[in-house]
Amino acid sequence: MKLELDKHSNRPLVEQLVESFKEWIESNGGGGGSRLPSIRHLAAEHGISRNVVIDAYERLVAHGLVRSRPGSGFYVAATAPTALAKVKPQSSQLEDVTNDMWSLFQADENHLKLGCGWLPNHWRESDDLTYAIRQVARQSRSGIFDYSTPLGSLDLRGLIQERMRLLGIGADADQMLMTGGGSHSLDLVVRLLLAPGDVVFVESPGYYNLLGLLRLQRIKVIGVPRLADGPDIERMEALLAQHQPRLFFVNSVFQNPTGSVLSPAVAHRILQLAEAHDFQIVEDDIYADFQHDPSIRLAALDGLDRVIYLGSFSKSLSSSLRVGYITARRSLLKPLVDIKMLTSISASRFAEQVVTTMLQNGSYRKLTERLRTKLSGQMAATLTLLKRAGWESFIEPAGGMFVWVRHPAIRSSTQLVLYAQRKGITLSPGHLFLPEDDDSPWVRLNVAYMNDARARSFILEPAGGRAG
């Protein structure tokens, strides 16, 4: 067994050791049952600490690649080849989505994640959050150890009810279901209301994780172009003459990735079409707290008859503190709860109580007020920089995180992504956001990362991404 370790690398030795063992196991067909070198022997052979070897072996055990036999040593697990096997994707499009997510989450921490969908860590405010965490830990033993109730915390649902009232959405607490974030909400809705072969309408461009989820469930996805004021109604009417969708997924506020906001006229027409063609609407409103002055919501106009409304605290508060919710007519709540209990038992009681504490003491309201101001300023500065550098913006959003842009000298965003990688920047190619998966010159930028010098240099000198 030959292991390659570089003591002068910035990469920790334990990570190098784990990766070397993984490669050896994979290249040797798993070698189930093979005994690994003893801790003492391996440490002496490579001149490294025994603690490094112990840590590496424990990580391999945790990944199911190695088994510990007390008094005997460590052995390659018989199931190791399965643990390392590549998962066969449903389609090349699905693989593109998951590969892009892998690249975002596994990118070196020194990479600038200019195309990601969350706020940078240095924007996060931890004082109020850690105070709420301490409060829950001190005052609620059940919050630390117990499952939440099937619908989720009644106190939190009551607070959300008031927040929704400010958006013009009338709903009782028993019309709400707490989830583990926006993606969990989408998954529950898809599982309940769709079957393989069903047709759904989505926005184009749109949220690529939703597109991947729908493809995973073998749903037929039809894209409706997103314009500056919402979905293209004329195109939607033409598509309805050809297809009968079960659902239409839409962002009302700061749409991902264009940053556009739904206008009242378009909102009313969408509801008229839903009534005439008998489909339901999933209104994904996870960016609601980034908006200064509330605009129209489909759920407010519809009274939750045909609209299923989704919200989340994960974008604004913490990506790790997964708290979202679904609000819908009562007849949908019980089957949604059934699926939630079968697939995840419950959402996090602890996370729900932390959010409840921050809503009750006003710290969440103050935090989002500061975030809105900061994002609006950053958006204005980004748009000015893009215009100076000759980029084209789809629209000029008033706030939110995203701007959808292209450079006139660049024909394919894939080339732009590769150029960005060479500059230590992570972007997602534009085709991932399109249901049609067509090549596209457009890319999504997250304005919260634009203060970084690498981002400014990339915007001002995109020549490396030109098609030639």
Image (cartoon, rainbow, N blue to C red):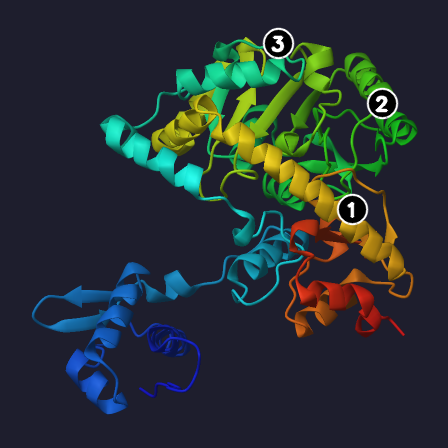
Spot occupied by residue 267 in the image (x, y as percentages of width and height): 80, 20
Residue position for label 2:
266
Q: Residues within 10 Å of mark 2 (few under 14, many from 20)?
A: some
Residue 170: which disc? 3
Quarter of the view holding residue 330: top right
| Marker disc for residue 380 | 1
Q: Are marks 2 and 1 in contact (CB under 8 Å)?
A: no
Using the rendered view, name the quadrant where residue 360 is placed. Answer: top left
Residue 165, percent from left and from top: 61, 13
Of 319 and 199, nearer the camera is 319
**Mark 2: secondary structure:** helix
Which of the pair 35/46 is nearer the observer? 46
Q: Residue at x 71, y 48 (%)?
A: 378
Q: Who's the residue at 62% across and 44% down the image?
A: 209
Seen from this angle, which residue lies furthest left?
71
Q: Is residue 261 above or below residue 71?
A: above
Q: Quadrant of the N terminus?
A: bottom left
Q: Position of residue 260 (x, y in %)?
A: 79, 36
**Around disc 3, counting alpha carbons within 10 Å, would you say few (fewer than 14), some (14 to 19), or many (20 or more)?**
some
